[in-house]
Image (tube, coloured by chain):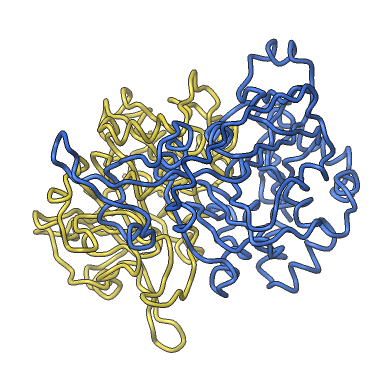
Chain colours: A blue, B yellow
Amino acid sequence: MSEQHTSPRDWHDRPDRVQTRADKRVRLEDLAGMVNDGDVVAVGGGLSSREPMAILRALLRRGVGNLRVVGSAHGIDIDLLCGGGAVSCSSESYVGFEQDFGIAPNYRRACESGAVSVDDSCCYTVVQQLRASVLGLPFMPMRSARGTSFPALHPEYKTMTCPYTGEELLLVPQLTPDVAILHAQYGDALGNLRIEGPPVLDLLFAKASRLVIASVEEIVPTERLVELGGITVPYFYVAALAEVPMGAHPTACYPFYTYDRPHTAHYYTAARGGAACFAADYLQPFVYGCADHESYRKRIGGEATYQRLAAWSAGTEAWMSLYREEATQ
Amino acid sequence: MIHDCSLGEMMIGAIARTIEDSTLAFHGYGSPLVQLALHVAKRTHAPNMVLVAGATYGLNPTPPFLSPTSNDWVMDRGAAHSLNIEELFDLAAAGRMGRMFLSGLQIDKWGNCNVTSLGKNKLAMKLPGGGGGCNLSCDVENLTLWTTGHRSPPDSSGRRRLRLVEQCDFVTSLGHRAVDGRTRQALGYRGKGPQWIVTDLGLFDFDTEGHARLRAVYPDVSVEEVRENTGFELRLAGTVEAVPPPDHKTLALIRHLDPLHVHEHETRAEDRGRRFEVA
């Protein structure tokens, strides 16, 4: 991403517009239509939680390509985009399924074949780069990462001697994603978002990106957002949103539903079987073979699946049973 | 009555012993052994430790059980507050984080770790990436490294893919020597670097030069076996002792905290039959 970062245009072309349309509700397909080939994309959520999976599936159905993905700790979201051939460069700091399933098969294949160029980053480096964008500054300084292999991978990082203390600092350039793709629990028609639980990088993504699009489990009146405990991302950052129940499936979106471990096990087996196996056993049935999100919900078992994943709230035993080994058989 | 324990439990006990009281400690993700070690330490010898959960950034949570993935609401239950990602990393950058835990598909003699890619000049294998490990390895005061893949049996062609190597193909997180040979002191880091490596064969500390040094082995492992499975010169810390098993309280805690046996996913299938006597 060096050429993106070093262009001086970047810090004059900040995302300084405010989004003031009174009603930002659109369809899921319209959200996907706002992402262009070649965009630098910041995907919200992290690991097995609150990833905007429905929007990503819609992007694959649209055939978007050459995306450059940036972020922190990701899993099935980036792996799916890689498996669908939509990514050309990854600056994520982690893409995997933790010890639960292991290395991300599609991501690994795409990196090793050269289809995806490896531009790995690190969480705090990304935080500092996003902060530069939020603050309207060309770069941020930090101490860390010097001495590791990251500066050689990223010639756009520079070092300077601190004029106050004389110590060596690393400068990392502003990162302004073209689009942030988020999934939140709640939103309102204006575009206010309420995220419950760990926000991961979503708030920084929202403040730093040129365009913010979001799916939400429920669109509610603004007063209801306040009752629920307040707004996480104020409306003027958000360009458009769609109500997409189970829009994060198979990742979790508490308090609505947990991580769907059996579905993820199926995904993983398909992905590990190779590109052809993944296309036949996963992409066809769950992405291209579903005309829209409604047909995806039917494909994954409809209301029964939702009820199974919502049962976590019944108590510890019910919650635990969703993750037992036999549940993935 | 508990008579014996598993390798995973031995490792959790060993990692827990590296955690001091009244410090701020953070675990990453994909690391149930470390998650359990922190919860054990908090409930035994380190009650005043500030425990920050990886992925959720929950503060002193009391999860009802260990979930198979880290960014799950299970893992921050009981936390009265959660940090956000920038605050967590700022704490480390400003020198307030006392201990963090890192691992690698390669760990070299200086404690550098690689979780980014294998292959020196050409990419041979893409690994998942290091999350925040790169930044934290530089900034956090003390590091405990761990791996469940130290034992590297030869494959059908007689080659070993060693986990403990002379030099990492890519340095994701920093040990005691930078890629250009500089020391942490020369780089001006506050973090003191790796202090321990807990493996499936034994326990290393680091000598004054910053080189890993075998300090203890499990009762079923010999020093010779460690040497065969180590890609760098094996330095010994005086007499190599036996890694002590965890006590009954620790084992009872582990079994209570991890009813789904999530941590066993982290140990190798061939190691799951190893049992260690508990006094």
Residue closest to the eye, A206 or A264: A206
Question: Residue B184 in the image: x percent, y percent?
Answer: 17, 50
Residue A107 shows in this picture: yes
Left or right? Give the position of B236 relative to A156.
left
Q: What residue is shown at x 41% (from left), y 33% (from top)?
A: B39
Whether residue B242 sits left or right of residue B26 in the image: it is left
- Please, is residue A215 above or below residue A325 in the view? above
- x, y percentage for residue A49? 63, 40
Q: Residue at x 48, y 71 (%)?
A: B125
Res. B278 in view: no
Where is residue B269 shown, x and y percent of the image? 51, 64
Residue A69 vertical placement versus A217 (above, below) = below
Q: Position of residue B197 (x, y in %)?
A: 28, 54
- Quadrant position of the C terminus of chain A in the picture: bottom right
| In this view, A228 is above or below B11 | above
Q: In which quarter of the image is residue A105?
A: bottom right
Of residue B80 and residue A284, the one placed in the foreground of this image is A284
Q: Which of A244 and A99 is in front in this view?
A: A244
Give the side of residue B40 with respect to residue A110, left or right: left
Q: How many labels does the image show?
A: 0
